[in-house]
Image (spheres, coloured by chain):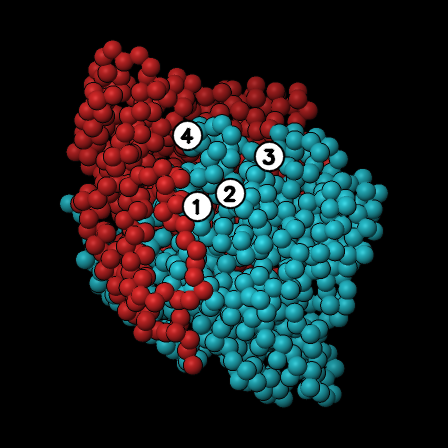
Chain colours: A cyan, B red
Amino acid sequence: MIPPAFEPETFREQGHALVDQLAEYLHRALRGDLPVLPWRPPATMATAWETPFSEAPASDPGALAALFARVIAEANHLHHPRYVGHQVTAPLPVAALADLVAALLNNGMAVYEMGPSATAIERTVVRFLADRLGFGPGADGVLTSGGSIGNLTALLAARQAKAGYDAWTEGSAGGPPLAVLGSAQAHYCVARAAQIMGWGKAGFVPVAVDDRFRLRPEALDAAFTRALDAGRKPIVVAASACSTATGSFDPLPEIASFCQERGLWLHVDGAHGAAAALSDRTRHLVAGIERADSVVWDAHKMMLVPGLVTAVLFRDGARSYEAFAQQASYLFEGGDPADEWFNVGTRTLECTKRMLGLKLYAALAIHGTKLFGDYVADTFDRARRFAERLAREPDFELLIPPQCNIVCFRHRPEGATDLDALQTTLRRRLIEDGSFYLVQTRLPAGVYLRITIINPLTSDTDLDALVHRLREAAKST
Amino acid sequence: MIPPAFEPETFREQGHALVDQLAEYLHRALRGDLPVLPWRPPATMATAWETPFSEAPASDPGALAALFARVIAEANHLHHPRYVGHQVTAPLPVAALADLVAALLNNGMAVYEMGPSATAIERTVVRFLADRLGFGPGADGVLTSGGSIGNLTALLAARQAKAGYDAWTEGSAGGPPLAVLGSAQAHYCVARAAQIMGWGKAGFVPVAVDDRFRLRPEALDAAFTRALDAGRKPIVVAASACSTATGSFDPLPEIASFCQERGLWLHVDGAHGAAAALSDRTRHLVAGIERADSVVWDAHKMMLVPGLVTAVLFRDGARSYEAFAQQASYLFEGGDPADEWFNVGTRTLECTKRMLGLKLYAALAIHGTKLFGDYVADTFDRARRFAERLAREPDFELLIPPQCNIVCFRHRPEGATDLDALQTTLRRRLIEDGSFYLVQTRLPAGVYLRITIINPLTSDTDLDALVHRLREAAKST
């Protein structure tokens, strides 16, 4: 007897109803016929979703549809062309459907047996990405749950390869405190990974950046020496491709040469920008990435799939077995871990893992690879055009010419005094009225508005409207 | 103009087709009208899924349905009543649909703005779980991507609270090497977390277990002293509720008292067994859990939702801010982190995070809480009955009376010599013919077959069939 909660016909009915709801959402969001976000303050939102779950099932047969309608209405609408906020993409519908398959089948992936086809699918996707980076046939890697976890995984492999002692077995006590060098603009998770590993705050050594927020390779030497002088052993440089705040690509060829000379591990945090490798028009931004020891690449940023899908790619695939040098008898069969490429849990922070590769596999198989390269190049172009336009407006100030689809700028109407406060006020105004979702960032020069043109539907017209809306909001402050 | 890849009517059509495919899958899997798993060796499976993704979109309009049909056919079928393998659940269809909503909406959750309603939903779910543990109103926590990451998060908080120095800022150099005490049967991720944090192999101090693989509280003192003598500072005991291999619940009241006396942090890895708190019939197994400083609870194990959804719960909610004491200007506003409960990225390893709470919220809201308690208690009962049955069979050997829904046993037909090899052979036989999915575990006494009755559809009849099938397979070896 099938319990009612698993009844396939109920699923069919509820599933069809949901697909119609989501199709309607897509229609409205893509046309901009919804607020970008229905902003409410945290306390109000928390109260609105508080509920004492009852013991009994919901008696109203429409309860699920009503819940989903509410979730859709009260979510941020990333498919709205005026969503230009954080680097999370408006997913391709095909990829979202693939995620439903992954959810219902729920094959785990610690060991091959838990998800044999999921493991094979992951392998294909990983090889595709490694190939696009220009890695050779010896490359390998894994998919994991997000860029922060991916960067930690790569740095664990770097630690094991370069500490000069068996850091996994001996721990920090095995040698001098270690350090990672990275630009002052590196994502916070790089320093955080160092601190998780017990390297402390001084375990992240910031390297000076140029006026476009790119790591200055000629400053590496000084940072390296500074770390040595402080009794540290620097073992890895984490380059940003690109930085989160300003979308700046560190110069990889120069950094790679420095790493080669000093015997350091080169890690590239390409969470956002590794996707530049997908188009001939943008590949120059990541020239040299093929020399990296490890690269992190988030498919949920610039590959149009739902979060989280992060690839951790190793030029020398054998390195991917070094992050976690460990066995569990009920899982792994022992022996040379590389003989067990198919037991991916030996190489990921997760034990059980979602079928992460499927959504990317489906998106690539159905839409073809050109779509992804075009998407990257087109959004980068659109950002450049927007920046050129801002540069011509006397009441706007562009931080730097954008290298990708991230643009930082501020509105500077005549007579404005506290520019930092003004940007914060303007942004809050747009968020609260739901007309745009954009973010802000604090830089040495002050607070800047920041957009990421990550929705492929965002047009030049939408960006014109952003300029207009900011001016209007400024007038009414 | 909407690009074809985002066309809502195409989504509608593909979505309806997929819902029908999945409904058919449910019908067949729940009836057992499919192999439990279509086993193929890793190399064969890898070749089968290799593909050079083409530049152009798939020209066949049926390509997506064909891909999904193949994925469904070649996956493990967790809804099959004879899936009794790893601790990953056959998800409730409602929870899978909720995951589709999460996938398409793709609201990230590092900061409140990225997913306001998702943040509120997570808060409600976290409070529900904390309340079931018997934590008071001061409790708090976060959802994260899996138990391994959850245990690491909790141990980072323990490190910060108990190291005796600011471990986050100073790193391992700030004091003596630290250690976590746990049973020799603790999940491998506990020792792994210690090694990630730079504590080395000696950073995990195994505590002896009794004949039912439960941590012996009277052995804590010796382990503690052993760590001290080795120059270690033990700061935390990680209790298992329950252990993975044998489903053994460590005695929490005694461990809690030991921790209290010594000023240690008590962490409970309740990934599987914290769900015992959901039923009056099973709650006794986790008596004392309300005294823990932190608890990890995987909803994708015993709460019928797709992976990954792990709650990291802190008795004193303020502790949840200590795992990662860090800021990123473009994300967090600064100030007292507890003033920003709604920026959950300050407290999770992930920066961007999937809307993890929604599937659990939907499942609880639609099915009511009783379903979950009954599910836990019923599967535990079923395991007990199966064990009693095995104990009566002369050709079967029960490892220990099960405390939950995990049962370890072996087949011992008359005249069998190499029992370890036999279990391995039998298991492989069943997996390769797709009749059952069960796992094995190596224990001091040898190799045992291991089942987890995690599918609510698995009946006593299915378990009778398992016994029968094992006998048959043994006869034909």
Q: Are marks 1 and 4 on the same chain?
A: yes
The answer to whether residue B354 is above or below residue B372 is: below
**Picture residue at 75% right of the left edge, 71% below the top:** A445
Task: Specify the amino acid type for callout 1.
Answer: Lys
Front: mark 2 or 3: 2
Task: Locate residue A263, reporting x and y percent.
Answer: 73, 42
Q: Which chain carries label 2?
A: A
The subunit carrying tag 1 is: A
- Count of labels in the image: 4
C-alpha distance separating marks 1 and 2:
9 Å
Badge 1 or badge 2: first in the primary sequence: 2
Q: Position of residue B404 (x, y in %)?
A: 32, 32
State the CA–CA distance, disc 3 to disc 1. 21 Å
Tell me the element at label 2. loop
* C-beta proximity under 8 Å, tags 2 and 4: no
Instruction: Tell me the residue that label 1 is attached to.
Output: A353
In-image side of A23 versus B142 (left or right)? left
Q: Is residue B290 visible?
A: no
Amino acid marked by disc 3: Gln
Same chain letter for marks 2 and 4: yes
Q: What residue type is labelled 4?
A: Tyr
Disc marking residue A348: 2
Say which residue label 3 marks: B195
Tag 1, which secondary structure?
loop
Tag 4, which secondary structure?
loop
Crowdedness near tag 1: few (<14), some (14–19) or many (≥20) residues, C-alpha within 10 Å: many
To which residue does mark 4 refer? A330
